Structure formats: C-alpha cells, structure tokens
Amino acid sequence: MSEIKISMKLFGAFRKYGDSLELAIRPGSPADIVKETLGNVLGDSARPLIRDSVLADEETILPGDYIFDHDARLSILPPVCGG
Amino acid sequence: MSEAVCVEILDTPLSVEKASAFVSDPAHGAIDIFVGAVRNHHQGQDVTGITYDVHKTLAEQVLRTICAEAAGLWPDTRYYVAHYQGDLAIGGVSVLIAVSSSHRAESFDACRYVIEEIKKRAPVWKQEHYPDGKSEWLPGHSLAEAEGPEVRHG
C-alpha cells in the first residue's frame, strides 16, 4: 500500500473550510506530517492555526510523533474556549 | 453509593434542577452551582449570540477526567457538568456545574477547579455573532501543550 487515507473532521475556526475532508499520507507518517499535509490542502493562511491545533481521535489527543500505519478517522482541534 | 459524576453535552436547555438533584446526597450539606451564560458584549463589542461547537465524545471524556481529578483533590464530592452545543441567544446557559460536599469549602473549591479546567481543556469553541451580521471564532487555549490523561503518547 503506497498511501493511507485520513478522514478528518473540522471544528471551530476550521469550519470555514467545511465540516470534513480527506488526506492521503504515506504509511508510517507521524501526526506532524498529517498537519503539514493539511496545510498543503488548506493553504498557507491556515498554517498558523494548524500549528496551534492538535489531532485527536474519538478518545484522545494524539502527540506529534504518533505514527499512522492504517487508515484513520481524526479531528483537528483548534485552541479551545469552552464555558 | 451511586455514581458520583454525570457529564453531558446537550443541544437542549440545561437544567439547574437536574444538576441539583443529581448531586444531592443526605450526607452533603453544601451544593455549589455555577451557571455560565451568554453575555451581550465582549471586549467592548456588542454580541447578539454565540454558537458552541463541541467534539462531543472527546468533550465528555475530558469532563469526566476533570471531575475525577477534582474528586481526587476534594474527596467525597459529587459532580454534574453539562455543556451546551449549538446556538444560544443572550442569557442562554452555556455551561452548568454542580458540586456537592459535606461542607461548603470543598464544593466552592471543586466547582471553581472544574470550570477553570473546562476553559483550558474541553474541546469546545465559541463563534460570536454581532449586530452587523458578522461572526468570529474566538481565540483560546491551545491543546498542544496539554499534559492531561486525555493525551495518548506514541
């Protein structure tokens, strides 16, 4: 398999780009590469927000060195302001 | 003793009565309730309403984690935490926290802990709406430096 598919839900300030999108990355890529790929798709104006955001699955926040070997369903979480 | 924590992400009005009923305990003489509501101004600008965006499953987990932390700091306490998801007009209740304890000091302190941690860690985002029809997502706390148990280390 040359690529794996990342399905990504968008929240908060990312909503202006839609509710979700799909990315293709090489197997073995870390989370930081997923964020870089997201920047390539959304454009340079989105990179500062992407830098301050984290990736998460349905249960946890994933660190930048988390490795993806298979297709994954993720979310990109911009800085939070609940309450 | 019944489960001491209840967390909810709701798109229906939050209920103080429900919160109070959940944390009520014959051995607890204090219930502290915090109600967060939408105000009509922010940093000198008029506001007409707020849309709350929430990662529901992760938010529920983070709220449970925060309550567990508080229960570790203030033992023998009960918690109800609800956060609203969707559109709210001015005065609408966005977050509701109830904490009970034997005496008042623990419930005050634990309730303050829960709301402060929610603001820093819960995956919730606010979009303010203004009288001119424009809207803006508010800046917040980056989760990039989060060190809580909700972070899975590779």
Image: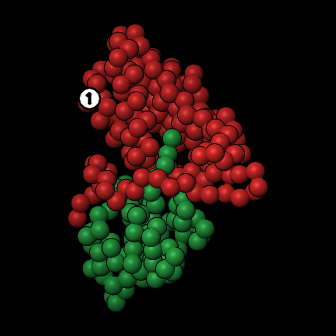
Chain colours: A green, B red
* Percent of width and height locating residue A5: 42, 79
Q: Circle 1 sits on which residue?
A: B73
Q: Residues within 10 Å of mark 1 (few under 14, many from 20)?
A: some
* Percent of width and height locating residue B101: 36, 17
- Asked whether B85 or A79 is in front, the reply is A79
Q: Quadrant of the N terminus of chain A?
A: bottom left
Q: Quadrant of residue A50?
A: bottom left
- Asked whether B3 or B8 is in front, the reply is B8
* x 37%, y 86%: residue: A3
Picture layout, residue A51 above or below residue B109: below
* x 62%, y 58%: residue: B136
* Percent of width and height locating residue B114: 39, 34
SS at circle 1: helix
* x 57%, y 25%: residue: B16
- Judged from this view, the residue extending furthest toward the bottom is A2
Q: Quadrant of residue A47?
A: bottom left
* x 40%, y 46%: residue: B120
Picture layout, residue B131 above or below residue A48: above
Left or right for B46, reference A42 = right
Picture layout, residue B96 above or below residue B2: below
Count every numbered label the image shows and give the total.
1
* Percent of width and height locating residue B115: 43, 35
Left or right for B80, reference B77 = right
- Judged from this view, the residue extending furthest toward the front is B44
Q: Is residue A5 visible?
A: no
- Amino acid type of the residue that numbered disc 1 sits on in the rendered structure: Leu
